[in-house]
């Protein structure tokens, strides 16, 4: 008999998953979907007792397919929770031979549809949850099923940290494989710049360790090349000392908009302190325009002059304090959205006032021209120091060039109805074209964008530029049967 707690969990998860598709019977568990039951059964008979296959009647299955936002989730034929790298290898051999579509979910924070979800076999990396700190080497090994806030919690007693995700709930694996912009990027570079090694299950099922010396081509490709080269089960990172930090969230009314614009532009142009960071949000929620500031300083107290302009603006709400880094990240919680969500992005070299004003004009325009079920959208200014790419001299898949600093300006939309998908996706593409023209008159039209923010149909040439031929050659060498092509994502 099912216990009351488990029954409650099943009902809650089923309700959440049902909302993903707006009750559409064509995508329900009993609806018309491809059948991959034989593949699921073969995998079940080939894995060890450390792993499990779950069918759609299981609460674990619902946990495995559920993502941070509903538009990222699909009903799979079954879910696999592998407990060993060898079992992932066994599954990949079967998936490749049967040509069964699959997906790999780390933290489940992907927003692009089909990137970590599938109608085939959903691989959930939940059991790869290790966080092992080595004080002698000052490194940490992290499992691919972890989230960054859990990692920060595990490292806090040691007084060390990693350049990882900026909000709670973000998974380690997808974020790192896409590059990774951190609150510590000004000091230590992108997250991939701190990676020393990977445990990788190759597309043929072989398990190898990848380092710069053991497999230089794969080491290059995994640094931003996403899920094209196999399934990473764990990462080894360099760590650094972490003190208390200062930061939180401040919101402002439209009455002080001009002051907020000026402060944002001045900080972006003039800040030279690598410990200081902001994300300035210009957003519309149910037709109401507003602004907010995520503010961070990597020490218990910021020195005078760093944030004075922001702090002098009359605020509506303010939740800023000296706190642990974990507490700061949790204050920027990224909760589950039982709605639909999309990111898009352009790369910028600066945030002058006229660009910010163009961004606000876009906010006002789209507040009147989007479907009624769009509940909110936001344009997020994320300035970094021009030296952000200088912390690594070893080539990485992303960015293809470190000669020019590029900042990942992103925008995102939240809505309810699947029937509005195409209208919202089109809006994100149109606003990107408009703002690209405003921001990048001095850049080549093919300037790359950050993979983790790119909308699903972004050409890979716009992610990896001149590195695409090398990435394709490595892909052909390690995955001649294109097993990883059976999974979603940006395909090399």
Image (spheres, rainbow, N blue to C red):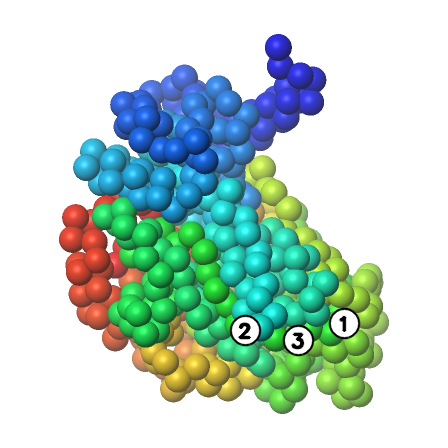
Judge the density around disc 2: few (<14), some (14-19), many (≥20) Cα neighbours within 10 Å: few
Q: Residues within 10 Å of mark 1 (few under 14, many from 20)?
A: some
- Report the residue marked by disc 1: 244
C-alpha span from label 3 to label 1: 10 Å
Residue hosting label 2: 137
The quadrant in which the C terminus is found is bottom left
Structural distance between the alpha carbons of marks 2 and 1: 23 Å
Q: Is residue 434 left or right of residue 129?
A: left
Left or right, residue 28 beside residue 469: right
Structural distance between the alpha carbons of marks 2 and 3: 13 Å
From this view, report whether residue 65 is shown above or below residue 220.
above
Between 464 and 287, the one lying in front of the other is 464
> Whole-percent x and y of residue 214?
30, 70
**Residue 259 picture location, percent across and down:** 73, 77
Identify the mark nearer the N-term, 2 or 1. Answer: 2
Residue tagged by mark 3? Answer: 241
Q: Secondary structure at mark 3?
A: strand
Q: Secondary structure at mark 2?
A: loop
């Amino acid at each position: 008999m099912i216990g009351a707690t488990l029954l409650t969990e099943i009902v809650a998860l089923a309700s959440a998953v049902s909302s993903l598709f707006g009750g559409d019977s064509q995508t329900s568990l009993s609806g018309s979907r491809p059948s991959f039951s034989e593949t699921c059964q073969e995998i079940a008979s080939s894995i060890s007792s450390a792993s499990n296959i779950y069918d759609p009647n299981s609460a674990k299955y619902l946990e495995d397919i559920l993502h941070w936002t509903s538009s990222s989730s699909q009903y799979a034929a079954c879910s696999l929770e592998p407990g060993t790298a060898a079992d992932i290898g066994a599954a990949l051999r079967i998936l490749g031979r049967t040509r069964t579509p699959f997906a790999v979910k780390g933290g489940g924070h992907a927003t692009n549809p089909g990137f970590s979800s599938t109608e085939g076999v959903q691989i959930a990396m939940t059991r790869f949850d290790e966080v092992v700190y080595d004080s002698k080497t000052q490194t940490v090994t992290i499992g691919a099923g972890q989230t960054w806030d859990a990692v920060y919690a595990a490292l806090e007693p040691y007084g060390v940290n990693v350049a990882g995700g900026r909000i709670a709930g973000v998974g380690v694996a997808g974020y790192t494989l896409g590059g990774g912009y951190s609150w510590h990027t000004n000091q230590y570079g992108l997250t991939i710049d701190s990676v020393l090694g990977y445990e990788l299950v190759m597309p043929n099922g072989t398990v190898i360790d990848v380092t710069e010396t053991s497999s230089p081509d794969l080491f290059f490709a995994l640094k931003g090349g996403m899920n094209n080269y196999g399934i990473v089960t764990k990462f080894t990172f360099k760590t650094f000392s972490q003190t208390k930090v200062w930061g939180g969230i401040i919101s402002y009314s439209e009455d002080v908009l001009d002051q907020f614009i000026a402060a944002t532009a001045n900080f972006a142009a003039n800040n030279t302190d690598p410990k200081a960071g902001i994300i300035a949000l210009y957003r519309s929620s149910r037709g109401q325009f507003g602004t907010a500031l995520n503010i961070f300083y990597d020490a218990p107290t910021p020195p005078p002059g760093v944030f004075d302009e922001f702090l002098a603006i009359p605020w509506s709400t303010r939740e800023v304090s000296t706190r642990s880094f974990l507490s700061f990240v949790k204050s920027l919680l990224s909760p589950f959205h039982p709605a639909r969500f999309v990111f898009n992005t352009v790369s910028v070299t600066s945030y002058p006032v006229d660009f910010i004003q163009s961004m606000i004009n876009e906010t006002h325009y789209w507040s009147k021209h989007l479907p009624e079920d769009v509940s909110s959208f936001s344009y997020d200014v994320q300035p970094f120091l021009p030296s952000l790419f200088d912390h690594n001299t070893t080539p990485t898949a992303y960015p293809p060039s470190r000669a020019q600093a590029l900042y990942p300006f992103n925008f995102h939309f939240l809505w309810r109805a699947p029937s509005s998908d195409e209208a919202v996706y089109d809006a994100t593409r149109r606003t990107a074209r408009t703002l690209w023209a405003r921001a990048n008159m001095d850049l080549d039209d093919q300037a790359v964008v950050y993979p983790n923010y790119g909308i699903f149909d972004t050409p890979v040439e716009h992610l990896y530029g001149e590195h695409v031929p090398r990435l394709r050659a490595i892909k052909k060498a390690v995955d001649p049967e294109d097993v990883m092509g059976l999974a979603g994502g940006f395909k090399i």
